[in-house]
Image: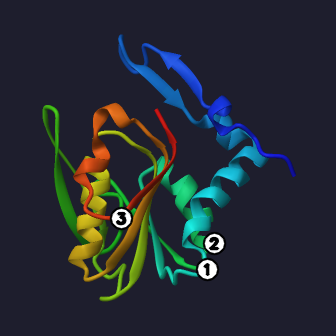
Amino acid sequence: MSQIDLRACVRDVPDYPKPGILFKDITPVLANPAAFAQAIEALALPFVGKHIDAVIGIESRGFMFAAPIALRLSAGFIPVRKPGKLPCAVDRQEYALEYGADAVEMHRDALKPGARVLVVDDVIATGGTAAAAIALAKGQGAEVVAATFFLELTFLGGIAKLDVPTISLLKY
């Protein structure tokens, strides 16, 4: 099977969601089964054989990458969601935005102490959401082995906010 140029599959959308922003649209990757499979395998491969107990996916596009990575690693899938979306008792982590704050939540019983986890999201930009997901996992006593992202917007410096090893498949 030949390799697909994943960078060529990412579509640039100018002025979205507001003027002056060049949005990196990953939906063409998701729509192409070969490209999507290649992306999942590339993101999972560094962790094969590393005994990952759970893969944490960050709402919502991170779920699309995290769930198949969890299957590939024979690990559980743990969703990290915006407030009010999970049905049971949750741990909550707030994080700063440019103007204001936001939060993410994870079921309070999602991870066992000592669990080895991988945090996955589609894009790392400013790093606030990923840092909050990492804090949630650590707060439950888990060992965060790494965080991995399909796409990194390097000019926003989000990786610097994370205190775990990181892998980004594509960097812009």
Depth check, front residue: 75 or 49: 49
The secondary structure type at the circle numbered 3 is loop
Question: Which class describes the residues within 10 Å of circle 3: few (<14), some (14-19), or many (20+)?
Answer: some
Q: Residue at x 31, y 64 (%)?
A: 164
Residue shown at the point (52%, 19%) measured from the top left: 13
User: Visible in this render: residue 89?
Assistant: no
Instruction: Give, as a three-letter code, the residue at label 1.
Output: Ser
Label 3 amino acid? Answer: Leu
How far across and down, in percent of the image, does residue 75 sit? 55, 78
Q: Which residue is mark 1?
A: 74
Between the C-alphas of marks 1 and 3, the distance is 23 Å
Task: Return the mark for residue 139.
Answer: none
The spot of residue 47 in percent (x, y) is 54, 72
Q: Which amino acid does the dot numbered 2 rest on?
A: Leu
Q: Are marks 2 and 1 in contact (CB under 8 Å)?
A: yes
**Which one is in front, 162 or 69?**
162
Secondary structure at numbered mark 1: loop
**Residue beneath the point at 61% across and 80% down:** 74
User: Which numbered disc covers residue 71?
Assistant: 2
| Side of 170 relative to 99 (left or right) | right
Mark number for residue 86?
3
Task: Tell me the CA gap for discs 2 and 1.
Answer: 5 Å
Residue 135, position in %: x, y?
Answer: 23, 66
Q: Is residue 171 above or below residue 90?
A: above
Q: CA distance from mark 3 to mark 2?
A: 22 Å
